[in-house]
Image (cartoon, helix red, strand yellow):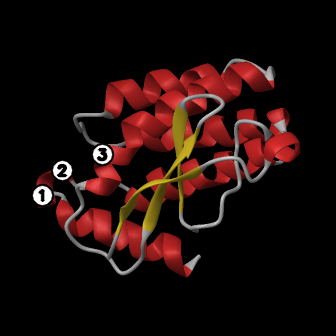
């Protein structure tokens, strides 16, 4: 939780005062869905996505907002884990620039790469826990980029 709060602080300090977001909700919502997908819990992923979508929709305008809403909406509309994971990949690609371009922060964030799916996800920990395959290939992947504090 400390890491999440630090990321939120980092993201908030980067954004202009009139465009600040509920960064805690953006990052925390994403990480919760990632964990549900790691457990292959499609029901929980859909439920969490519905909550996360509400947070995103209530945010002031930001460049990536429409793309993030589109990706997260796809997760909310299905219980099919493969479809959810594909939409999560889209959300990951949209969210990483927000995190990567933040100038402040006290925690590292990791941009992970899944060579089997040829896509990325974001983690607050350096350990590989692949949300695209769950237990079947939990440790498949590598750190592709890192946002250092």
State the residue position of label 1. 16
Alpha carbons under labels 3 and 2: distance apart: 16 Å
Residue drawn 46% across and 21% down?
A: 70
Please tell me whether mark 2 sits on a helix, a strand or a loop.
Answer: helix
Image height of 18 relative to 3, above or below: above
The mark that comes first in sequence, 3 or 2, is: 2
Q: Nearer the viewer, residue 123 or 136?
A: 136
Residue drawn 68% across and 18% down?
A: 77
> Residue 132 placed where, x, y %?
70, 36
Residue 57 visible to the viewer: no
Q: Nearer the viewer, mark 3 or mark 2?
A: 3
Image height of 79 relative to 93, above or below: above
Alpha carbons under labels 3 and 1: distance apart: 16 Å
Image height of 77 relative to 141, above or below: above
Q: Nearer the viewer, mark 3 or mark 1?
A: 3
Q: Nearer the viewer, residue 2 or 131?
A: 131
Quadrant of the image containing the N terminus: bottom right
Residue drawn 12% across and 58% down?
A: 16
State the residue position of label 2. 19
The mark that comes first in sequence, 3 or 1, is: 1
Residues at badges 1 and 2 in contact (C-beta under 8 Å)?
Answer: yes
> Residue 129 placed where, x, y %?
71, 55
State the residue position of label 3. 97
Alpha carbons under labels 1 and 2: distance apart: 5 Å
Please tell me whether mark 1 sits on a helix, a strand or a loop.
Answer: loop
Q: Nearer the viewer, residue 138 or 63?
A: 138
């Amino acid at each position: 939780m400390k890491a999440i709060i630090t990321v939120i602080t980092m993201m908030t300090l980067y954004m202009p005062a009139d465009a600040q977001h509920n960064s805690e909700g953006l990052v925390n919502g994403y990480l919760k869905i990632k964990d549900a997908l790691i457990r292959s819990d499609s029901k929980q992923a859909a439920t969490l996505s519905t909550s996360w979508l509400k947070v995103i929709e209530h945010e002031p305008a930001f460049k990536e907002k429409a793309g993030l809403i589109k990706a997260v909406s796809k997760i909310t509309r299905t219980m099919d884990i493969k479809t959810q994971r594909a939409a999560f990949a889209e959300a990951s690609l949209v969210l990483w620039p927000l995190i990567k371009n933040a100038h402040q922060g006290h925690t590292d964030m990791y941009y992970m790469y899944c060579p089997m799916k040829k896509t990325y996800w974001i983690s607050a920990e350096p350990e590989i826990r692949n949300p695209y395959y769950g237990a079947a290939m939990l440790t498949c992947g590598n750190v592709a980029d890192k946002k250092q504090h």
